[in-house]
Amino acid sequence: MEVIIVPSSKEIGALAADSIEALVRNKPNAVIGLATGSSPLPIYDELARRHADEGLNFSAVSGFALDEYVGLPSGHFESYREVIRREFTNRVDVAAENVHGPDGSTEDLLGACQAYEDAISAAGGIDLQILGVGTNGHIGFNEPGSSLASRTRIKTLAEQTRQDNARFFDHLDQVPHHVVTQGLGTIMDARHLVLVAFGAGKADAVRDFVEGPVSAACPASILQFHPRATVIIDEAAASKLAGAPSYRHAYDNKPAWQGL
Ligand code: F6R
């Protein structure tokens, strides 16, 4: 796992965007896994800027959302498929038919989970998965206790997560209790994981998954088993990392040819 500590969320966005730009220039039909929430917004802003100012081309790219609320009607403002469109894919030239998300509004949720796994496989797998981390260590909506081998399935949100996400709704009561999420096994199949986090509120979760034991109690800790996991965080999110000096030293002395 590579841990990169930068001054602010703007640099997080720029560095993650560099990695995505390198991928897309090398493989124009790249498959990108898309997180929602606040953490990836600096990445999407920077990619939208590069599209507008520098002509970065996403026309052959496909996107797969990490997760979706169950029970929000399709087209709901806070449904993750809509958020992904609004915050990223509509701001660049990703074709609408290439933007995928688990269907959380169908009666057949089990079928939708399998269909989502099948769609990711049919696309050739995810090249680069963008991740945020919850304050309780979740990735996607794999809450503490999730199987480390899990595939796309229905999960019940932890109350902490509902409270954290209530800021996107008018009232806590409107935050769904259930979600469909890529499993930890699904996420681990992506060829490159890029997890971003900023702010002091993430410091405990970052310490636990970077330096704690690999455990279902902290789902993000599964990244320690991934052959190519990049963690890009700001100073505040890094503030509880005992190894911060050595992560900085390694990054400062990284050979330029290596990229992320
Ligand atoms: C969202 C997702 C979640 C978030 C996490 C952090 O698609 O999968 O794991 O990344 O809850 O949320 P923010 O970024 O809003 O702090």
Image (tube, helix red, strand yellow):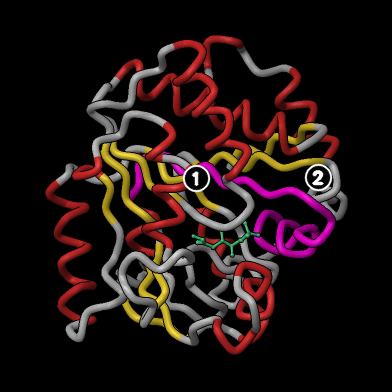
Q: Position of residue 113 (x, y in %)?
A: 23, 72
In the rendered structure, which amino acid carries the disc numbered 2? Gly
Dot 2 falls on a residue whose secondary structure is loop
104 in relation to 22, above or below = below
Quick one: 40 or 168, which is closer to the camera? Answer: 168
Q: Position of residue 70 (x, y in %)?
A: 37, 80
Residue at 35% over, 47% down: 190
Q: Can you tell which mark lies on residue 243?
A: 2
Residue at 31% over, 75% down: 104
Quadrant assignment for ligand 1: bottom right
Quick one: 53 or 104, which is closer to the camera? Answer: 53
- Per the rendered image, the range of residues in magenta is 189-211
Q: Position of residue 138 (x, y in %)?
A: 57, 68
Quick one: 125 or 57, which is closer to the camera? Answer: 57
Q: Dot 1: few (<14), some (14–19), or many (≥20) neighbours within 10 Å?
A: some
In the rendered structure, which amino acid carries the disc numbered 1? Glu
25 in relation to 204, above or below = above
Q: Can you tell which mark lies on residue 87?
A: 1
Nearer to us of marks 2 and 1 is: 1
Q: Dot 2: few (<14), some (14–19), or many (≥20) neighbours within 10 Å?
A: few
Mark 2 or mark 1: whose residue is earlier in sequence: 1
Confirm or deny contact between disc 2 and disc 1 (CB under 8 A): no
Residue at 68% over, 49% down: 197
